[in-house]
Image (spheres, helix red, strand yellow):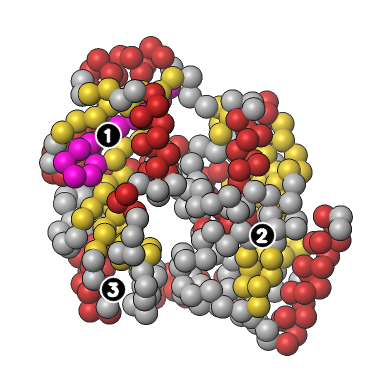
Amino acid sequence: MLPADIASAFCTRIREATQTGQPLRLRGGGTKDWYGGEPAGEVLDTRAHTGVVAYEPTELVITARCGTPLAEIEALLESHNQMLAFEPPRFGAGSTIGGVVAAALSGPRRATAGAVRDFVLGAVLIDGSGEALRFGGQVMKNVAGYDVSRLLAGSLGTLGLILEVSLKVLPKPVCEASLRFGMTEIEALAKLNQWAGQPLPLSASCWHDGMLTVRLSGAQAAVEAARRALGGQPLGDVDAAAFWTALRDQTDPFFEGQNTLWRLSVPSAASAIIVGGRQLIEWCGAQRWLRLDADANAADAAAIRRTVAAAGGHATLYRAQDKAAGAFHPLAPAVAAIHQRLKASFDPAGIFNPGRLY
């Protein structure tokens, strides 16, 4: 089928579901089915709607249909020495660009480059009435109306089917180097906050089991000067690439197994979060992974969220056998009301991915 025919079929199917009240489970490659609440509804597979619509390397913008494999997009960008700077995790070969935007998960470079939403320039969305709506565009600056396209990042398909998306891309760094330091969690947090206030080309950081690893990216002169200033043990290019790839794709041994995994988002200046378990700290202290052996019962989940909220952050139950405690941190009443109004505007029948977000 032609892309226009596939899009038309999506619109028809969504209109039918709205009329009958049939919930739809919007799904690409299914590599993130475990993320968020339990998936529900009849599967609407987006993988047939594939292909890069437009890519002009000199404009630093790529537009692709929702079912386009992430690997295909990254290979195309690589051929022009460019990248998706937010480094989305690749949980499998089936990962699609629609799922990347809907989940809005970012990798190690997020703290310095920005999050997924910061790179979304425009999108085409099919809402609950089966209408294709276009938001934003393919330019770096677009101030016409509300920035709905960025609102879709992290919506987990609850507002509609992301049919097409335009993303800003960036050139790959000219030079990169990784350094390793032995230090405690408190020492690492202090160092990271100290370095964040200096003109250093830091692009990623990770502390785990008494070892802090940082990545420097930029012009060769800047990277070399930072290496001399910071000291530490340099990692070889192969070892460094393997380390950051394993962290990005969550294939590092820390993420393996059936343990309960929390993602804690706190201000980078927050001190150590004492909640037991094992921790891995990224994003200069702003993202902290907590691995627990026990299941996430309601009482423990509430205690973790209270502790993290007291530090000025929120806690996501990222992976668990049982997510009865809720995958995402409870919203403040005013924010919850905004969510509800947005949901009612785009999906009044409530057919899109029910229960996946809240």
Asked which secondary structure carries label 1, the reply is strand
User: Within 10 angstroms of label 2, few (less than 14), some, or many (20 or more) residues?
Assistant: many
Residue 337 point in image, percent of width and height: 47, 75
Q: Main secondary structure of the magenta part?
A: strand
Query: Which residues are the magenta region?
Result: 207-218
Q: Quick check: can you spot residue 57?
A: yes
Residue 196 point in image, percent of width and height: 28, 33
Q: Which residue is mark 3?
A: 296
What's under tag 2, amino acid-wise? Ile
What's under tag 3, amino acid-wise? Ala
Residue 25 point in image, percent of width and height: 62, 73
Query: Splitting the image into 4 quarters, where does residue 219 fall?
Result: top left
Residue occupying image coordinates x 23% and y 71%: 294
Q: Which residue is more in the foreground, 37 or 305?
A: 37
Looking at the image, tell me whether mark 1 or mark 2 is earlier in sequence order.
2
The relative height of residue 142 versus residue 37 in the rendered view (above or below) is above
Magenta includes 214?
yes
CA–CA distance between discs 1 and 2? 36 Å
> Mark 1 and 3 residues: CB-CB less than 8 Å, in contact?
no
Magenta includes 285?
no
Number of callouts: 3
The relative height of residue 44 versus residue 255 in the rendered view (above or below) is below
Residue occupying image coordinates x 51% and y 37%: 85
Looking at the image, tell me whether mark 1 or mark 3 is earlier in sequence order.
1
Q: Which residue is mark 1?
A: 213
- Say left or right for 260 vs 303: right
Looking at the image, tell me whether mark 3 or mark 2 is earlier in sequence order.
2
